Image (cartoon, coloured by chain):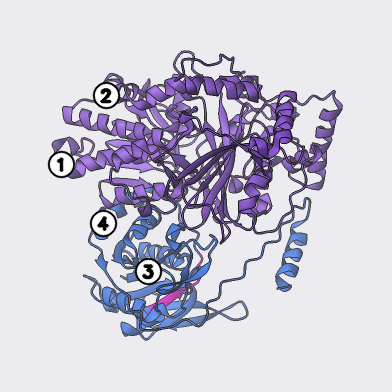
Amino acid sequence: MANVLHIVVCAGVVPDPLQTLEPVTGPNGPGLKNEMVLPAVLDPWAASALYEAAALAAKNPGSKVWLVSLGPKAKLQQVMMTVAQKAGFELVPIDGPIGGFPDAHSTAAVLAETIAALPGLDREKLLLFGGWESATRGAGVTLQLVGERLGIADQFQGVDEINLRDDGSFEVLERVEGGKHQVSVCLGAPAVLGWATGNLAEPRNNPQIGMANMRSLMPALQKAKTAKLEANGLRYLSINLPKQQRTTRVVKDLTPDQIAAELVEWIGAE
Amino acid sequence: MSVETTATDSPSIAIDRQSMEVDIACAGFGPAMGGFLTTLTREWSAHPEDPAFESKAVPGMPLQVLCYERADDLAAGVSGVVTRAQGIRASFPQLNPAEIPMAAEVKQERVFYLLDPIGASRRSLTLRAADAVLRGLGRLAGVRDCAFELPWTPGFLHKHGGLVLSIGQFNQWVGAQLMATGLVQIWPGSPVAGPLISGKKVEGLRLADQGVEKSGAPAEGFMAGMDVRAQLTVVGDGPVGAVGQALDERLGLPEGNARREWALGMKFVLELPEDSPLEPGTVWHTFGYPEPEIFGFLYVHPERLASVGIFVPSWMSDPSRTAYRYLQHYIQHPALWRYLKDGALRSWGAKSLEESGKHGEPYLCGDGFARIGEGSGSTNMLTGSGVDEAWATGTQLGEAAIELLRAGKPFTRENLAATYESRRRASWIEHGAREAENARNGFHGGMVKGMIGMALAGLTGGRLSMSAHIPPVHKQIRPFPARLHKGLKLKDAVALAVADGRSLHDALLSARGWPEIPFDDILLVTHQDALLMGGKVQAAPGFADHVVFRDAGLCIGCAEKTCIAMCSGQAITLGADGAPAFEREKCVHCGACLWNCSQSPDDEHSNIEFRAGSGGLHSAEN
C-alpha cells in the first residue's frame, strides 16, 4: 500500500565546488572571492536528497515534493533551469542575499518559517529532506535546526537509503564510522533526513519534466518572497578550505590494481 | 545530423520519440541568441496584449519560445573579448559595465610586434632581417622587452568606447534578464542533435538522444531526444554547432562560398599581481610571437583579472600546430611576463573561430529558419570583431520576427529574406563584412603578405586587397617532409611522445628547440592540470561520442595527426591501433579537431565529424 508523503527538500545554491574557491573577508564577514562570478549549482548533497525525494514520491502516488531554496533570485532562476529537467517538484524560492558563510540559525529560521506556511502541507506526512553536508559552505547544523524549529524529533543524518513499509513506518540506513551503515526504524513521518549521496544516479535532463515544472517555476520565482538574514553579531574565528593537491603524471599501461595501489599510497601519505 | 521528418529512426528499433509544438525553437545560447531574445521579449513586454504574441502552436497561450543550449550553464561560454559594443549598446543605451561582472570600458589600446627572444620561432628570412634591424636599433626604434610598439594603431583595429567582456558573464547577465521576463525558456544541458527538415523546409529541432552507447546505439535507460516542432527555428549554435553544420550539408552554401578559414582562440584568465599597474580596460594586440602566424591579446578586466590568449589560424601550415604550450611561451614573452610573472592562473579555455567571413556565409534564411551569429558568417575578420556583430544579427532577426508576427505572415524564405536578410544587408554588419571580405587573403602567401593585405584592405575600406586561392582546410596543413632530416626528427618526436606518454605537441615543440616550461603550479601549470583549474571539463553520461573519425583507415595512414596536437583538452590521443582515440569526458567542445585534420574522404570535408554533444568546459570566467 502506498503512503502519501509530503516531502520538503531544503537545498541551497552554492558556487560550484569544482571551481577554484578562495576565502576572503569582506564587509559582511568571511566569504568567497568573486562569488557572484562563479557558476552556481544546487548543493550536490542536497541535490541527492531531491532526486531521492522525487523517486520516493514517484513510488508513492499522491505524494508531493517541494523544493525550498534560499538564494539570490537570479542565481536560483539560472540553476533551476537545469535542476527542473531532472525531477518533478514545486519550487518555493526565497530571495535572499546568501553568499559567503551565513549564520545557520538565521538561515534555519527563514526556512522553518517558510515551510510552516506552505499551503497544503500536512505535517503528519512531512519528511524534511536536505543535504547531510554542504559542498561549499556547510555549517553542518542547518537542517537539524530547521527540524527543531518545526518540532520534528526524529532526525537522521548521513542517510543513504530509506525503505518505506506499508504501515507508514520506514527503515533508514545512516552512515556511521568504519564504512558501515546504522539501520534504524522510524514509526513514520514527520522526520528529518539529511542525505549523504544516496544510491541514485543523477537523473538525465528530461525536457518533458522541465516543461511540466516550468508551469509553476517561473510564477514562483516572480512571486518569491525576500528574506534578510540576521547576522546575530557572530564572528568567525577561522574557516578551513579542503586542501587541494594535484600531482599529475601521464603513465601508460598501468593495470587497474597498480593504479588503485598508487592512489591508496598517495592518499595515505596525506 | 539532419532529420527527415518522414523517415523512421531505424527499421529494427521502435523508438518512442516525444514531440512538442512550439512557436519559435532556438538552437544555442550565445550573444546572437541573446540579441534575438532580448529584442523579442522587450517588445513583447511592452505590448503584452498584442495578439501578435499569442501562440499559434498552443492556442490560448502566449507565444511559446524555447531555446536549447548544450552547456550545463549559460555562463559556460568560452571567450574573453574586446568589442566596440555598437550593437550591444544599441540594445542597452544606458548600459553600465559595472552591472556585468568582469566588464570594463576600453581605456587604452596598444599594438605590439613581438620579437622572438628564444630563437625557436619559425621565421622567414624576410622576417628575420626585419627583426635584426629592429634589434639593432633597439630603444631608438622603441623596442623594449623584445617588443616593438606600433606608433600608430590603425583605425580599423580601434575599439574606443567599447567594452572588455567575459562572454560567460555577459551571457549570464543577459540570460538572467531574459528569464526574469518569464516570456522565454532557456534550457541548458540540452544539446540539439540537428534540424527537422522536410524537403527544404526546417520544421524544428531534435534534441540529442540519451542513454546511448558511444556509437549512439540505444542502451540501458535509452531516452529518445524530443522533437521540438516550430514555425520558426532560429539557428545560433555557432560555427561548429550541429544544426548549422547539418543545414550547410543539406542546403549547401551559396555559389562560391566555402568555410575554409578557421582559428583556435585559447586563453588564460589570470589574476594579476597585487601591484599590477595595468588598468581595467587595457587592451593589447600582439603579433609575431610565438610563431609569426599567431596573434595574441591581453585584455584587463576589473578586480585584477586579465584574459591573455592567442589565435592559432588554419593558414598556419605547420602540421604540428598546437596551442596550449604556445600560449605558455606567449605569456613568458618579456613584454608580457613583466606584468604577469607574479600572477596566478584562474582558468583557461579554448574556442574555434570561423574566420571565413563573407567567404563562408551560409544561406541566412529559408523556409522556417534563420541563421544568426558567428555560424551565419557575421564575424568581421578585418576588425577582429565577432560578438557585437553576432548580437546585432540577433536583434535584426528579432525585429524581423516581430514584424512578421504582427503582419500575420508565415516564416517563409521570402518573408524572412524581406525582413531579416534585408535588414542585415543594409546594416553596418554587411558594410563591414564587405570591407573585410578579402582582407586576410594575403596570409595564405605568408605572414608579411598577410599583414600588407590586411593593411591595404583596412586603409582603403576594402577597395584594395590581395587575391588568393584558399584551399580546403585539410590542404592547408602541410604534410611532414618525410625525406628531410628535419621531418624525420619531428617524426621521431612523435614516436617518442607515444612511447613515453608525453603529449604530442610537447614533444614536437621540444624537438624544435622550444625550452621546457618551468612549471610552478601557480601560473605555469601542465595542460592536464589546467583542465581542472577554475572550472571543470565534464560530460553527462549517456550521450554518444560527438567527435567521430569518418574513415579509420585514413587516420591510421595519416602521418601528421594534427587533430591530436591541436586538441585543446587532450581528449584525442593516439590509440593502440594507430588511429586517434576520443575521450568525450575531456572534450572542451572547442571544435578544433573539425578543421585540424589533414585527411579528407571527399576533398572538401575533413575526416572528422563534430556532432552534437553534452558537456564541455564549465568556467564562468571565460
Name the residue nearer the viewer: A265 or A240: A240
Q: Which residues are magenta?
A: A192-199
Residue A244 vertical placement versus B184 (above, below): below
Give residue B159's mark. none
Q: Which residue was labeled with disc 4?
A: A216
Report x, y in % for residue B69. Answer: 42, 43
Which quadrant of the view contains residue B129?
top right
Return the chain for callout 4.
Answer: A
Earlier along the polypeptide chain: callout 3 or callout 4?
3
Dot 1 lies on which element? loop
Q: Label the purple chain with its letter.
A: B
Give residue A98's mark. 3
Query: Is residue A177 in view from this perspective?
Result: yes
Dot 4 lies on which element? helix
Relative placement, left or right, of A199 versus B36 is right
Report x, y in % for residue B536. Answer: 55, 54
Magenta span includes B38: no
Q: CA distance from mark 3 to mark 4?
A: 23 Å
